[in-house]
Image (cartoon, rainbow, N blue to C red):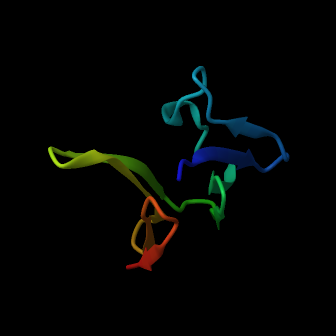
Amino acid sequence: MKYSWIATYEDGTELVCTGENLFKDIDMSRLVKFGWYGDKKFVLSVKPGEKLIAFRRHEASIKSDVVTSYGLGIEGRFLMLIDSSGNVEVK
């Protein structure tokens, strides 16, 4: 399962993950919502002063294809780990 991100700002505009828009392009000072979107949606509201944690991790092994997992959370509050099947583990 593959996910793309969408960052939503306080004025309702969105920055969508594309080849041109990178994670580093997100204006964190205006961010109110961030989500991973695919077959399922994983969306998180971000309050002023909170630090978003979001990542995509690729793991490869000799015996299998590359496996991608995703992370989403707020620093110091919680972290959601999403595996390639869409299963979630909250830490």
Residue 34 seen in the figure: yes
Question: In this picture, is 10 found above or below 85?
Answer: above
Q: Which residue is depicted at the point 64% across and 53% down?
A: 38
- Number of labels in the image equals 0
Drawn side of residue 9 relative to residue 11, left or right: left
Locate the C terminus by quadrant: bottom left
Where residue 68 appears, as percent x and y from the top left, is 39, 50
**Residue 27's image quarter?**
top right
- Expressed as whole percent of the image width and height from the top left, the position of residue 61 reads 18, 47
Residue plotted at (39% across, 72% down): 76
Percent across and percent down for residue 60 are: 23, 45
Nearest the viewer among 75 and 39 is: 39
Residue 81 or residue 61, whichever sits in front: 61
Q: Which residue appears farthest toward the right when viewing the image? A: 12
**Residue placed most toward the observer, 6 or 87:** 87
State whether residue 29 appears in this view.
no
- Above or below: residue 87 compared with residue 72: below
Left or right of 4? Residue 88 is left
Q: Quadrant of residue 35?
A: bottom right
Give the residue furthest to the top. 20
- Residue for point 59% across, 37% down: 26
Residue depicted at 48% across the width and 72% down the height: 87
Whole-percent x, y for residue 24 in the image:
49, 33
For this orientation, the residue located farthest to the front is: 63
